[in-house]
Image: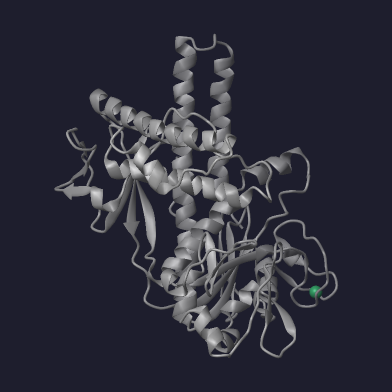
Amino acid sequence: MSFQEIRNQGRAEPWWRTDKDMDMIDVRFQGQECQPLPLTALGNQAFRFRLHFPREYLAPVFGYPYQMIGYRVVGISGFTHLQTTCFHAIIIRMNTVKIYRLDNLSHAMFQRLKVAQMEAAQVWNLCMEAHKAARQEHVRWLGRNELQKATKGRFALHSQSVQMIVHAFLANVEITRQLKPSNHQMKYPWKTKRFFPVMWPAQAVSREHGRVVLPMGKGRKSLVLPLDLPEHSGACTLVWKNGFELHVCVEVPQAEDAPGDVHATVDLGEIHLAAVTTNTGKAMIVTGRGIRSLKRQRTMRLRTITKKQAHCKKYSRRWRKLQRAKNKVSHRSERRIRDMRHKATRQVTDFCVEHKVGSLFIGNPHGVRNRDNGRYHNQRMALWEYGKDIDYLTHKAKAARILSFTGSERGTSSQCPRCGHKHKPKGRVWRCKQCGFIGHRDLVGSINMHQLAYGSQVEFPRSFTYLRPGLSRSSRRADTPQRCL
Ligand SMILES: [Zn+2]
């Protein structure tokens, strides 16, 4: 049912306004006072009933990067008036990107991939120049048809690859146009690129016995890569990320229905990556110490190499050799951290599915990082990538049909869950000076979020599960102390 239809039935005459920081929505029903609700209230059963939004209409539309309410698309903070129907959102299937590293390429193949990327950059440059000229002469900007006509048949790429670059360019222009009034640093594309990722839509890619064939246009040899892509793979993109990578769109099997209707909240942290509590008294903590130690290890190794590099002449043979070693260290640890992060967020989603969670609130620690807390603490905060945690969690929750939403978590970790006494804890244990409450610090934050997100106070859980993101590589020292709590 579209939003318009609901309106026509005269059941509700709502209007919306979102507050940037609070993620609040003002809703007014016909003949009633306006009432401000947190955006999260849309996941609330009673509210949904009043708007006559069946669950299956609402659940798939909450997701990165936009949330859809009725025919409107709502950004995480604020409103954009994209005209889309609700029906549209339902048929979007969920995709994820699988990354295949293209190591051990032959020299000829490497060169061909490089040339293809340089050709793609030429397409972008042509669009950019044409757009820039139109902008400077104050004439009408080129649209999709004009740009497609201008680029047709002129480049050594598959015609659809060229079209996709044009689309990417136009999307870039459109987003810039939307953001420009609120952000003056936004610039329309102006830079001449040397390389650009080459994209192939799903219908252009063909798979055969452990190989993938990427066409390069009529009369040119296709790129054949020895990759065994999964069954439901689609569009491919050739990306340079410290070596060539093929990013393949793969369809994700989505759960039929939400696991249940339990409410849960997640408190993200640096030491404890995620602390989850439900309103049924279940709790879990996933530690982030593994990721932190990987980051420290990386810093230390890079420092040793940089010290050695300082003694040699820049760009000398030895300097280059050390530079390669440095790249190797940082790329490897980047992959390991990513893997660890995926495992940690997977455990949170598994926990939610196991305990029949229907909606998940992810506290956004935004604001914690903006404070100046001295050199050491600031560096630690800068290394904490909670945005990624939120992204991964949102995506995984969506695949499990769990409604997830974020909002500010301000003040949740400094309040006693029993008596409301405010106090900033030191260390991992929360001790209340007023009522004598003792509990794990991150769980306190998570418990207090229930009040913020769902408007109901939840009992502090009696016990909790403590997990590591995955089997970390075993230490050479068998007796490594596991000081994790
Ligand atoms: Zn207390």
Residue nearest the observer in this picture, 191 or 415? 191
Measuring from the top left, give residue 253's x and y in whole percent.
33, 66
The number of numbered badges drawn on the structure is 0
Q: Is residue 324 left or right of residue 443?
A: left
Q: Is residue 442 above or below residue 109?
A: below
Q: How is the image coloured?
A: one colour
The quarter of the rendered structure image containing the C terminus is bottom right
Measuring from the top left, give residue 480's x and y in whole percent.
52, 46
Residue farthest along the right direction in this orientation: 434
The quarter of the image that holds ligand 1 is: bottom right
**Residue drawn 57% across and 81% down?**
280
Residue farthest along the left direction in this orientation: 209
Measuring from the top left, give residue 465's x and y in whole percent.
54, 68
Which of the 4 image quarters holds residue 464?
bottom right
Measuring from the top left, give residue 55's x and y in whole percent.
48, 81
Residue nearest the observer in this picture, 443 or 51? 51
**Residue drawn 44% across and 17% down?**
321
Q: Is residue 263 left or right of residue 56?
A: right
**Residue drawn 37% across and 65% down?**
93
Q: Is residue 387 above or below residue 215?
A: below
Residue 224 seen in the current view: yes
Which of the 4 image quarters holds residue 195?
top left
Residue 462 seen in the current view: no
Residue nearest the observer in this picture, 211 or 313? 211
**Residue drawn 41% across and 48% down?**
144
Q: Is residue 415 above or below residue 234?
A: below
